[in-house]
Amino acid sequence: MLISFSWLRYHVALSDTETPDAVADKLKLSTVEVEGIVRSGQPLDNIVVGKVLSAEKHPEADRLKVCHVDVGNEELDIVCGGSNVAVGMLVVVAKNGAKVKWHGEGDLVELKPTKIRGVVSNGMICGADEVGLINRFPKKEEKEIVDVTSLKLKPGTPLAAIVGSPDAVLEIDNKSLSNRPDLWGHYGIAREVAVLTGRPLKPYVVKSIKKGSGVNLSVSVAEQQLCPRYMAVAMSVTVVPSPTWLQEKLIVIGIRPINNVVDVLNYVMLDTSQPLHAFDARHLPDGAIVVRPAQEGETIVTLDEKQRKLTPDMLVIANKEKPVAIAGVMGGLESAVKNDTTTIVIESANFNATAIRKATTKLGLRTDASARFEKGLDPNVCETALQKAVEMLSAINKTFHVVSEVVDVGKSKRSPQQLEMPINFFEKKLGVAIPPKTTRDILMRLGFGVKEKKGQLLITIPTWRAKDVTRAEDIVEEVVRIYGYSAIPASLPVFPITPPEKNTLQTLERNLLDTLVKEEAFTEVYNYSFVSDKQIERIGDTKDRYLALDNPLSSEKPYLRRCLVLNLLENIVDNSANRVEIKLVEVGKVFRPEEPGMRATNNGDELLPAQDTYLTAVYTNKKDQNPFVKIRQALESLTSVLDAGLIIKPAKEAGIGRHPARNADLIYKGQVVGAIYELHPAASRNFGIDSRVGVLKLNVSKLADQWQPPKAGYTSLPSYPEVRRDIAIVVKKDVTFEQVEKTLKQADPLLVAYELFDVYEGATIGQENKSLALHLTFSHTERTLTSDEVDKAYQKITDNLIKKLVAEVRS
Amino acid sequence: MEHKLEELKKDALQAVKAAKDKLHLEEVANKLLGRKQGELTILLKGLKDLSDEMRKSAGQLANEVKQTIEEAINVKRNTFEAEEMKTRLVEEKIDISVPALPKKTRGHLHPNTIVQRDLEDLFSSMGFTVLDGPELESDYYNFTALNIPETHPARDMQDTFYIKGHANWVMRTHTSPMQVRAMQKYGAPLRVVVLGKCFRNEATDVRHEHTFYQMEGLVVDENITFSHLKGVLEIVAKHLYGDDTQVRLRPKFYPFVEPGVNGEVTCFTCQGKGCRLCKNSGWLEIFGAGLVHPNVLKEGGIDPEKYQGFAFGFGLTRLAMLQYGIDDIRLLESGNLSFLEQF
């Protein structure tokens, strides 16, 4: 919302030291967010109206024109880039020496004679935003210059004659006003400024309306709850443009003047925050106004010339036959005030905030009026606003007069609410005592009534604050924000030194991630929690297993991920251009609708879907045909976190998107907690990845349920020397290392350790075979082994391997 | 005999002195002192043929001669070795400016993770429990329990992602739902922080993301005041941006706190003088905070007459962007390695 500083000064007598900046700073610290200050009265010396006499194409530049412009006392050649410049057009010319805002941004720049691509340019033809005319002449396109032909001015007229007197406009962030309906007009802001500066606020004085005759208005309100108050009065008028002072006031804060009736109603809204509307009485036969829910199938063409479909949850203002306005949102085109209107009916009403908000959402139509109504306005202001509007119209033209009674449905005034609170409540909440006199003073200046009785404060809440002040905590806020948050000293709470509860999931997440990042050189990525139907298809899954967003931003990725792989594969594609090897890891939640998660409410039975945290790592290298090895290596480095309890078993189920012959489950304490596998070649191809991908996934939530930090165990160092021998065996490819291990373990008690150090496949040993080479360690706890003993044990092992695995031992 | 020894000594010292290099010196040494054929060795063998008295004096001399020669050889040898070492060290010069090859790749944590862990550790050290909680939340915990009524604009479709087929499920719009979950689970007194992913139905551009990360803090106890809130916020600000950092609080409306404020800290790039980063205000807005609304305590099963508390929250994503000067929020969730490898 835009607030005119000079308008504020009409309500509060500010001193010269209370500049727009000073006032904005105070508002920022205690009331609302002021996003900026725009000074509309920039120096306009040497800026005049000019008439374009000719416009030739610049010899060196297609988009520029060399214009010859009449500026009254002389004719100037000016190079202009305006897309719309044309011969005969009245334009705004900044002559040399003028100060303008280049392209509407930054500081003012003084113009000097210059050459543009070799052509001399004396001055510049301005855009609306360069000379403070943007509110009055909004731009249709970026490169446009302002066309003031419609003003019919003589070339040479100083621009100052068109632009109003200097003012400063405070740009207030509407979001910071969302709970303060009283601040949606200048008077409300003025009240705050008065409190913050200690200056008196002028009372809002309006004359009561003298009823007239001629029109019999009758108003019926079908649902009082949706329209707590409806006031209306008819006036005879002549519709003409407003006086300049009124137009200027509106232009400064970005409102385009329309005509005297509409301008006055807008002015009153911007002053009091109460939206008003005027109907042409010709469209209210018999003066009948009906406030009712719309009927199914009804439509209305609104002021913006759009046809709107209405539904029964929207409130309309209707005549006997059909709607003439959508209540609180926008008037109808047909019943609007036109140039030939002679009698108007002014509406000043109060509508239910929620109903208005729902209607605007449904219609996709937000207006200055609806923005105010949906905050919850004070119905008491209806009367003040209506009186102000009638007063202003009568003042503009003495012949305008009221031609009906003032109708007021639901006129019962909102009476102020009261609340009681202990005086020491402020100290209890804030941790510091504010002098009671200060407290009382702040509240009273804000319009609250304050009475003190036996340590209690009895507070009367002004009706315009009924919406946002309802309890003692709200009163504390009122006081402290004016008193100043900076005046509250900082201190630290005192707690017993109880250590915080352990968060195993967090510890595990960190340790696993750190290991992969620091030891295995994986890089952590963050991905969205959403996936597309294409991704689901590419991995070989079906959409029905996924939860979906009801209102996704784009229809591209509407599904909630069930695993992290889908987006990680996209990461591989995105990064593959200049990289041979890619190693990525992500930790995040996945959504599985078929598994139960946390409670949806404290007491109900409904459960949210399971949202386990997964760690997933992907690895690919364009030169690596068996990425399983590297991914298993990554897993093995996690044993520093998970100890040896993690078991790798051939996968029980094929899984989705997994290479069936390169697929293993990870088992921890009897439960499947993850998998390592190579991505199915078909899935790789579908995603457009031309290398093989290894995947490691761990359900960290499940692990965390069972996990205990690994314990290093000590066994005494061998007292007698160990003997090492190497062995190499050739077995069929389908013999697993697990089988070899089993055979070794059973072979001889003197064998205390073994370690695989090479696996070889190749033509020299036969295509169907593989060779495994191991270090074997022999020792005895009570004596030194003789070489004879070792030979015997070695022989036993060899025999066993040959017998059980049909192995060939190579020496 | 004694004469021979003197002669030998003289010749020997001459020979040692004349040795050109180490190899030559060793030849000389061997020729003189070799166990079998050494000149001195042979001479000494003749000692046994002498009379007792002569043997005694000649033996003494022989030892002296031997020591002298050995010492001379050692000195000469040390000289040669020192020279040899000197030459070797010069020859072994390497180019220390060559990077180690093959280049070892290292992994990288996401910048958000780095910032998040830093704060988790800070709050853990102050006795706060660290929580996360579900990202797909119920309407009840995300809104109702937080004093956000049915009609609040935050519930509009354009701000919140809803789940198809489950009218009361949403993607959490903030970490605040965990306030009530934590109160219900642990009761008062309470000290928790919640960190995690949040979602808003908002079109993405350089400064806006539909997915972002927040941190939330909650303290509930019998005598918790606004002054304490300010104290804790100052600790965080100083931890993040240095001891001279100040905190400024301004009113801001959040339904789940009363009074509610937003918190700004002294801009760390200009120390409050005003720059582009802080839009010339000297302040950076990073917190939202306030005293927990009594309705929220009630929903959490905590008696608002007996207990009060404060809550604060801030955007981890924003902190990470400020900390590293990241100018496009979309990079954070792009998976772009050229970006991620910078951290």
Image (spheres, coloured by chain):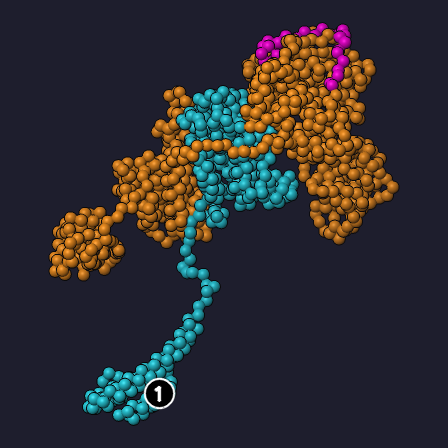
Label 1's element? helix
Residue B150, x across and y down, in percent? 51, 20
Residue B72: image quadrant is bottom left
Residue drawn at (35%, 44%), measured in percent from left and top?
A695
10 Å crowding of disc 1: few (<14), some (14-19), many (20+): some
Residue A720, x across and y down, in percent? 19, 57
Is residue B122 something that shows in the picture?
A: yes
Q: Nearer the viewer, residue A253 or A288?
A: A253
In the rendered view, does A421 fall on the left or right side of A566? right
Residue drawn at (55%, 25%), measured in percent from left and top?
A429
In the rendered view, does A633 fall on the left or right side of B122? left
Residue drawn at (56%, 43%), measured in percent from left and top?
B243
The residue that mark 1 highlights is: B13
In the figure, A233 relative to A524: above or below? above
In the rendered view, does A635 fall on the left or right side of A787? right
Looking at the image, which residue sits at the far front? B53
Q: Nearer the viewer, residue A399 or B184?
A: B184
State the cyan chain. Answer: B
In the rendered view, does A524 fall on the left or right side of A671? right
Residue B106, x across and y down, in percent? 42, 51
Residue drawn at (37%, 54%), measured in percent from left and top?
A623
Q: How many marks?
A: 1
In the figure, B26 relative to A128: above or below? below
Range of magenta residues: A203-228
State the orange chain. Answer: A
